[in-house]
Image: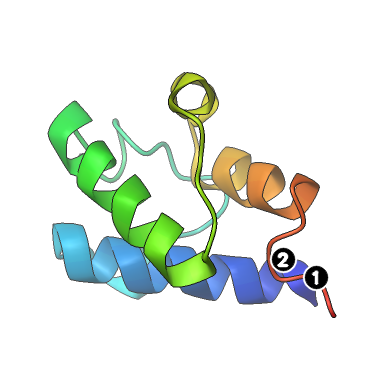
């Protein structure tokens, strides 16, 4: 499933950038409240995620990522992880 592949990418990035246990990265988790992602860490995570998935995430999209699920939904909507 596309969602699973996208979630794996997000787990990998957050683990690498923020030292978060990948098992803690679930769609219902708040990036700030549950996972402790601050604005600087979010910047690092977005850049790393862009590198991993091979696309740019516009700066105006970031404020809409309140939860991991929001980020998964955005990446699915723009076609990341879709079969080629």
Left or right: 27 with respect to 36?
right
Q: Which residue is drawn at 49% across and 19% down?
A: 60
Q: How many angstroms separate mark 2 from mark 1 (CA)? A: 9 Å
Residue 3: mark: 2
Q: In which quarter of the image is residue 63?
A: top left
Q: Which residue appears farthest toward the right when viewing the image?
A: 84
Q: Which residue is drawn at 28% across and 46% down?
A: 35
Q: Can you say whether 33 is above or below 46 in the image?
A: above
Closest to the observer, 11 or 25? 11
Q: In terms of secondary structure, where does tag 2 sit?
A: helix
Report the quarter where the C terminus lies.
Answer: bottom right
Left or right: 72 with respect to 14?
right
Task: Please say if the residues under marks 2 and 1 sit with CB atoms less than 8 Å apart.
Answer: no
Residue under numbered circle 1: 82
Residue 9: mark: none
Q: Where is residue 69 drawn, in percent x and y?
A: 60, 46
Q: Residue at x 45, y 45 (%)?
A: 29
Closest to the observer, 50 or 70? 50
Report the quarter where the N terminus lies.
Answer: bottom right
Q: In which quarter of the image is residue 25?
A: bottom left
Q: In terms of secondary structure, where does tag 1 sit?
A: loop
Closest to the observer, 53 or 3? 53
């Amino acid at each position: 499933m596309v969602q699973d592949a996208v979630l794996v990418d997000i787990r990998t990035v957050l683990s690498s950038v923020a030292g978060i246990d990948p098992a803690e990265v679930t769609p219902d988790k708040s990036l700030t409240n549950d996972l402790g992602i601050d604005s600087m860490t979010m910047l690092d995570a977005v850049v790393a995620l862009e590198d991993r998935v091979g696309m740019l995430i516009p700066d105006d999209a970031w404020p809409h990522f309140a939860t991991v699920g929001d980020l998964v939904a955005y990446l699915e909507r723009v076609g990341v992880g879709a079969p080629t």
